[in-house]
Amino acid sequence: MLPRNAPAWLDHLLTWLEQFEDCFGHVAQRGAFRRYVLGLLGDSRRKSMSAMLARVNDSSTYQAFQHFITDAPWMAEQVWRRLRAVIPDREGLLILDGTSFPKQGTRSVGVARQYCGTLGKIANCQVAVSVALWTGERAWMVGARLYVSEAWLTPEQRQRARIPATVRFQEKWRLALTLLRQVRASGISVTGVLGDAEFGDNTTLRRAFHRAKLPYALGVSSNLKVFVATPPLVAPAQLVGKGRPRTRPRLAQGIQSIVVSALAREAATREWRIVTWRNGTNRPWRASFLARRVTPAHDWRHRRVAPEVWLLCERDLGATPRTKYYFVNLPPTASLKEVVRFAHQRWAIEQQYQELKDELGLDHFEGRTLAGWQRHVVLTAVAYAWLQHQRRHQRDKLPTLPVARAVITEILTAHFFVTHPHYLDTMLKLKEINLRI
């Protein structure tokens, strides 16, 4: 059960935070850590450092608060490792996501004109690759890496944003693969991977999932080519006379690849089926689906045959239907409903980011350095994990965000009176003086 009063919530929060305190080498850092997380959990609309510090109501200076985030000697990666070690759920799907942070200026580390998913267009923004563990009931943010383009790795930009020499350019799919390896190394059992076309279009990433024997459901672009089922091959023809013999197989006569949009377009109407599914406790959704066993064709450029997967085509039921495409690595015996439900569990990442951004200020960081961004994000994940931990122990339905905000306000009020024990006496004396006047 969740505690019924704010002091108990505060006690639970401080107990949760104690698990991270040895990630900070100095007592002042541990105090700043607690204050920062309390500020993130506060009810201020903007989670800038000045707003959070004012809300926490203690004697710390803004300079000390800023020093903790930008300059103090502690490692965000160590906090990530501890977070992955202490979350109570140890098994689930890993959801990959490229989340964006719109920016007005050009000084924030990693900012560039690039596709911004938040705005749905090319815009000035930062982009990060993050991963969430989805258990079927709740999501835990378990890793994030900022995408730093090569333009930010010049000596001048490195100095300005304090980007260490050890940071090298990595494509987003490589960042995702690194995060997957870190999560698995922490002892968390990853039962599958979900992601959008930013990851699904990458052949190398899909190949890595196959090597790891991981089921996956990844969005793909409409222009990707596939072979229907597994393409039949013929042995290479032997040369007569001189010359090296051919060793690579060839496609059987008449076998050609086809783009996935054409495959969906040419399918008979009777092959499409309407499926209903539900995302969590939300209302049911309905759409028309086509599922075919296919072999992605990209590997054939190197005369390799990729493993066979499901191509799932989804067409909404609106007046002007749009079609989405997924590669789903589930057994051939999987039913259409199983394939659809597996692919649509990615909705959890959208709900998580709504809470992380709107309620905890994931995208509110105003600093310009890489270390500052990394630290703000991991502390936001710690705050979110505490909320999920509290929800996990509630027997009734999960608390709504307005309820959570109200309780958090009580927490900060309780924290204020704990740290200012003479405040009420002082206010009563001032009231008596005013009454006499």
Image (cartoon, helix red, strand yellow):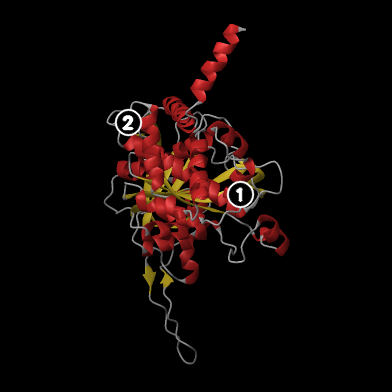
Question: Is 307 on the left-hand or right-hand side of 417?
Answer: left
| Amino acid of disc 2 | Leu
In the displayed structure, 8 sits above or below 362; it is above
Q: Give me the residue at 42% from left, 57% from top.
A: 180
| Residue placed under numbered mark 2 in the picture | 2
Left or right: residue 120 compared with residue 278: right
Residue 263 placement (x, y as % from top left): 45, 49
> Along the polypeptide, which appears first: circle 1 or circle 2?
2
Query: Which residue does the numbered mark 1 point to in the structure image?
Result: 67
**Crowd band around label 2 with a 10 angstrom C-alpha radius: few (<14), some (14–19), many (20+):** some
Q: What secondary structure is found at the residue carrying circle 2?
A: loop
Depth check, mark 1 against mark 2: the one in front is 1
- Along the line of sight, which residue is nearer the eye, 159 or 327? 159
Q: How many neighbours does mark 1 have within 10 angstroms: few (below 14), some (14-19), or many (20 or more)?
A: some
Q: Nearer the viewer, residue 29 or 126?
A: 29
The secondary element bearing badge 1 is classed as helix
Q: Nearest the camera: 16 or 324?
A: 16
Residue lying at the far bottom of the rendered structure: 242
Q: Is 331 situated left or right of 159 in this image?
A: left
Q: Residue at x 54, y 19 (%)?
A: 427
Task: Give the image location of residue 331, x and y in percent.
Answer: 29, 54
Q: Which mark is residue 174?
A: none
Q: Does residue 274 appear in the picture of this structure?
A: no
Rendered position, 338 above or below 404 = below
Residue 358 in picture, x, y percent from top left: 53, 33
> How far across and how far down the image is residue 255, in percent?
43, 63
Identify which residue is drawn at 33% across, 30% down: 3
Between the residue at mark 1 and the residue at mark 2, the CA separation in whole angstroms equals 34 Å
Q: Residue at x 40, y 53 (%)?
A: 82
* Image quadrant where one finds the C terminus: top right
Query: Is 107 placed left or right of 295 in the picture?
Result: right
